[in-house]
Image (spheres, grey):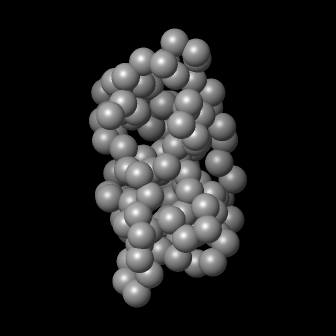
Amino acid sequence: MNMATVIPINSAAKAAVGWRRACGVEDIPKLGARVIKTAHGNVAVFRNAEDETFALQDECPHKKGPLSQGIVHGRKVTCPLHSWTIQLEDGCAVAPDQGCTRSYPVRIENGEVFVRLGA
């Protein structure tokens, strides 16, 4: 099971809408996640084996399990509680399971990961 590190965001960032630095790309282990705290709950920032990054609300749509502690494989993460598989690009469960968790746009600049937390 992956252990995610929590990275707090300062008060000004919590209230602001827009792109926020989450961490360096290298701060996220391959096939792992880091967590950023926001005013609306935790956001998990994932990195897969191909060095792609994704951001999802850190809650499985099934029973709110911490996706940041799940197993990353390909472009999916498996929830550690009940093994639901969630697509990293859109936060939707893989059939036959149903439901979605919120996904966030991610961009990389100079080795830094930015997540758009606003609407």
- Residue nearer the viewer, 90 or 47: 90
Reply above or below: 91 against 82.
Answer: above
Q: Is residue 18 visible?
A: yes
Q: Residue furthest bottom?
A: 96
Reply above or below: 88 against 96.
Answer: above
- Residue nearer the viewer, 56 or 21: 56
Query: Residue 14, percent across and down?
Result: 52, 22
Query: Residue 87, percent across and down?
Result: 38, 66
Quadrant of residue 69 in the image?
bottom right
The residue shown at (48%, 19%) is 15
Question: Can you say which quadrant of the picture contains the C terminus?
Answer: top left
Q: How many numbered discs, if any?
A: 0
Quadrant of residue 117 in the image?
top left
The residue shown at (58%, 17%) is 10
Query: Residue 64, percent across and down?
Result: 61, 61
Quadrant of residue 7 in the image?
top right
Reply above or below: 20 against 74.
Answer: above
Question: Can you say which quadrant of the picture contains the N terminus?
Answer: bottom right
Query: Residue 27, percent across and down?
Result: 54, 37
Q: Is residue 54 visible?
A: no
Q: Residue furthest top?
A: 12
